[in-house]
Amino acid sequence: MKKIVKLMFSQTSIIILLLAFQVLFLFSGALRITEDEHFTYLSGAIRALSVVVMVYIINKGGNPESKLSWIIQIAVFPIFGTFLYIFVQGQKLPLVFNKESKRIRRKTSAYVKQEGDILRELWAKDRRKYNFVKYMNEYADVSAFKNTDVTYFSLGEEKWKVMLREMEKAEKYIFLEYFIIGEGKMWGSILEVLKRKAAQGVDVRVMYDGMGCLTLLPASYPSRLRKMGIKCRVFNPFRPLLSTIQNNRDHRKILVIDGKTAFSGGVNLSDEYVNITAPYGHWKDTAVMLKGKAAFSFTIMFLELWQIAERKRIDDYEVFRPADFGGREVKGYVMPYCDSPFDGELVGETVYMDILSKAKEYVHITTPYMIIDNEMITALGSAAKSGVDVKIIVPHKADHWYAHAVAKAYYAELIARGVKLYEYMPGFIHSKSFVSDGNTAVVGTINMDYRSLYLHFECAVWMYDHPVIGDIEGDFQRTLTKCRPITAESCKVRGARKILYAILRVFAPLM
């Protein structure tokens, strides 16, 4: 009984109740206007407004599938759909957020200027790679680096062990930014190191997403960490307000130490990510560790969002730059990058599309969620039809049933276009990686779904002609032996399930 009462009055339950109340309020208002004869003229005016709104949606920028989802909703429920669209899209907070994000990016761009010798080398080596890196520097404010060690972790357990060791070496700062932090053995061991380093005078900062940790950490958790000497901020705290800003989550996973060592990838800080618990079978995840000049890019990424969460500007980023980046002479190029929903560039999707369009032999992909737009379907299909071996590993077991169901709605079409799909049979694959032709790879946080590609703050590492790429492809091949191919016959759906998949696909961009 105590658990039920606690759940009823928890922060999560109250927020869900308030959100439901807002939707119910809008729906009841729309219903009354529709049915009450006293509102005949108002009903007609709103229906006329719904046409104006649909025309506006068609002509505004953005993802076509997302616009189509809204148009269908407004066409079927003109009054309620129009109310909901104006209410959700009309919030001022995203505009304020956007303005501050752009101001910070203008200041930090000075720290990510591309070194000219790298561009000259790429020009001579591969003109297409040169064009891509130049685009990323000019439009995504990121740079490619040489002489950066990259270590690839094929499981979360491997990353966990090494990150504990590396944090012990910190002298100036440890910055952590994660979508999910869950109390347990993994986070407990990390927290012990953070407390000890903070007591030694190291600048320790922790930032986590307000939605990702909504049910995992209490609202008082930041103050609990501050008592340990750890600075803590919640990025975009989830509030009971229907607004587009609630969609813009911090999905990044960053650990950066003294600007010399950085970690990223799919692994969050919770026990299921290192297979201490197994709610969905074996959890397959991946990550990378960077040592060298490229690692400082993650310091800049972290500080950009930290300022927004802290609401306090940083005037001098130079104090965070190490005097000596360490590292050694390593072949190849490494480019950490981030993606923002406010920068006007679909950086995450552009990187994936670039790999697909330039592949000659193969593109091998792992992704936990595959809810993709027509452009990505076309790119995958075009690569496969041109003779490129396109293989995608997806989970066998789902952590979110609806995301898994929507993904299945794309299987038959992709297979018909020549894409080869496989299910990871031991459990859930959370890895987000692309590897192509033995010379190009990406490991990061970016799923192949609308939320990652259009709505979230994300990050990843692009690598070219680097020795670690062989490790990534080798892991893909080993993982493939634990997978079952998805065939045209096995993904056929009939009856009610076929109707459900069709509906889910239409509204996928709004999920």
Image (cartoon, rainbow, N blue to C red):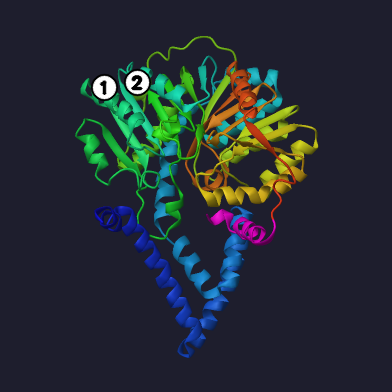
Res. 388 visible in picture: yes
Residue extent of the magenta highlight: 494-511
- Is 207 left, or right, of 290 in this rendering? left
Name the residue at the bottom extreme: 37
Q: Nearer the viewer, residue 396 or 80?
A: 396
Image location of residue 234, percent across then percent down: 33, 42
Q: Quarter of the image holding residue 361?
A: top right
Q: Which residue is mark 1?
A: 197
Residue 495: in magenta span: yes
Q: At 43% across and 12% down in the image, what residue appears?
A: 326
Quarter of the figure that contains the N terminus: bottom left
Residue 474: in magenta span: no
Label 1: element kind: helix
- Is 135 left, or right, of 18 in this rendering? right
Q: Is residue 357 above or below residue 155?
A: below
Q: Is residue 20 above or below residue 285?
A: below
Indicate which disc residue 289 carries.
none
Label 2: element kind: helix
Q: At 67% across and 48% down in the image, what residue appears?
A: 410
Name the residue at the top extreme: 329
Name the residue at the left extreme: 227
Q: Is residue 190 above or below residue 242?
A: above
Q: Quarter of the image holding residue 303?
A: top left
Res. 142 visible in picture: no
Image location of residue 174, percent across then percent down: 33, 25
Q: At 54% across and 26% down in the image, what residue appears?
A: 335
> Label 2 is placed on what type of residue?
Met
Circles 2 and 1: CB distance less than 8 Å? Answer: yes
> Label 1 is placed on what type of residue?
Lys
Q: Which residue is mark 2?
A: 167
